[in-house]
Image (spheres, rainbow, N blue to C red):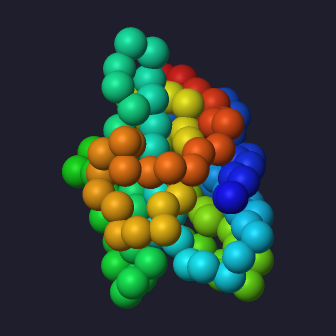
Amino acid sequence: QVQLVESGGGSVQAGGSLRLSCARSTRTTSTYSMAWFRQAPGKERAAVAIIYRYNGGTYYADSVKGRFTISQDNAKKTLYLQMDSLKPEDTAVYYCAASPASANTSPANWPYWGQGTQVTVSS
């Protein structure tokens, strides 16, 4: 079983920055692919950034490339999402997700989820 707890959300003006954190607790030493998804009102949950368990490779949605950076501290079992140059369209609830496999961008392939943290960007 994997438990994920996000923190770091909040309100910021356009052009500002936020850093989200996701603390992971597990009963095993298994490694996981980790991801950040977001869901805006009336929209489907979509992958923002992924870091893969096998090679540490990353994926970014086109809308956040060059502005967001996903990283993790394995010793602390913590995932991060550094968000810079934020735009109003980045406003959403951001979710941390984990998968024991090298999952793709579909939320259905991610079995473990945090509770979400709200990010609001004002113009």
Task: Report if residue 22 is visible in the image.
Answer: yes
Residue 76 sits above or below residue 114 on the image: below
The residue positioned 44% from the left and 23% from the top of the image is: 40
Residue 116, position as x, y percentages in the image = 63, 36
Q: Tell me which residue sits at (69%, 53%) in the image.
A: 4
Between residues 42 and 114, which one lies in front from this camera angle?
114
- Identify the residue at horizontal 44%, vertical 78% (top origin): 53
Q: Is residue 13 left or right of residue 107?
A: right
Q: Is residue 15 above or below residue 62?
A: above
- As drawn, is 105 to the left or to the right of 122? left
Q: Number of labelled discs?
A: 0
Q: Image height check: is 90 above or below 6? A: above
The image quarter in which residue 68 lies:
bottom left
Name the residue located 40 percent from the left edge and 69 percent from the top edge: 101
Q: Residue furthest top?
A: 42
Q: Is residue 84 visible?
A: no
Residue 106: % across, % down:
30, 45
Residue sticking out furthest to the left: 62
63 on left or right of 73: left
Out of 17 and 103, give the one closest to the viewer. 103
Quadrant holding the N terminus = bottom right
Q: Position of residue 90 (x, y in %)?
A: 44, 34
**In the drawing, does residue 97 fall left or right of residue 45?**
right
Query: Along the line of sight, which residue is nearer the eye, 78 or 4?
Result: 4
